[in-house]
Image (spheres, helix red, strand yellow):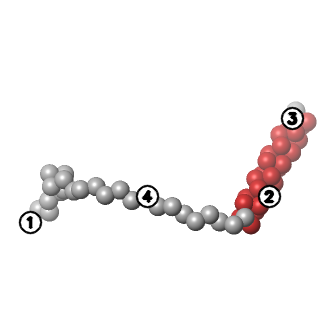
Amino acid sequence: MGHVIAIFGTLIALNLGFGYWLSEQNDVAEPEEGVVEVEEVPADPAAVPQAEDQ
């Protein structure tokens, strides 16, 4: 049973290390310029909640 724990622990450590290394490599690369899409949606007067005067 100890061998199984050692193998899984090693695989988890390798996975975390590789993920960290890959994220560092990705951070060094030139960041791409973001694209924002805007959609104009007309407000439906029936869907707008009305403020109640109390």
* Nearer to us in this view, 40 or 16: 40
| Alpha-carbon span between mark 4 and mark 2 | 32 Å
Name the element at disc 2. Answer: helix
Q: Disc 1 versus disc 4: distance between alpha carbons?
A: 37 Å
The residue where tag 4 is placed is: 37
Residue 12, compared with residue 33, is above or below; it is: above
Query: In the visual, does 26 lie left or right of 32?
Result: right
Answer with mark 3 or mark 1, whichever residue precedes in sequence.
3
Mark 1 neighbour density, 10 Å: few (under 14) some (14–19) many (20 or more): few
Disc 3, SS: helix
Q: Whole-Å distance between the Cαs marked 1 and 2? A: 59 Å
> Which callout, 2 or 3, points at the residue further toward the start of the chain?
3
| Mark 4 to mark 3 CA distance (whole Å) | 49 Å
Q: Which quadrant holds residue 31?
A: bottom right
Q: Quadrant of the C terminus?
A: bottom left
Disc 1 secondary structure class: loop
Vertical comparison of 15 with 1: above or below: below
Crowd around label 4: few <14 · some 14–19 · many ≥20 (10 Å) = few
Residue named by callout 3: 4
The answer to which of marks 4 and 2 sits earlier in the sequence is 2
Which of the two discs, 4 and 3, labels the residue nearer the N terminus? 3
Q: Which residue is mark 1?
A: 53
Whether label 1 touches label 2, CB < 8 Å: no
Identity of the amino acid at label 2?
A: Trp
Compared across the picture, whether 21 is left or right of 47 comes to: right
The outermost residue toward the left is 54
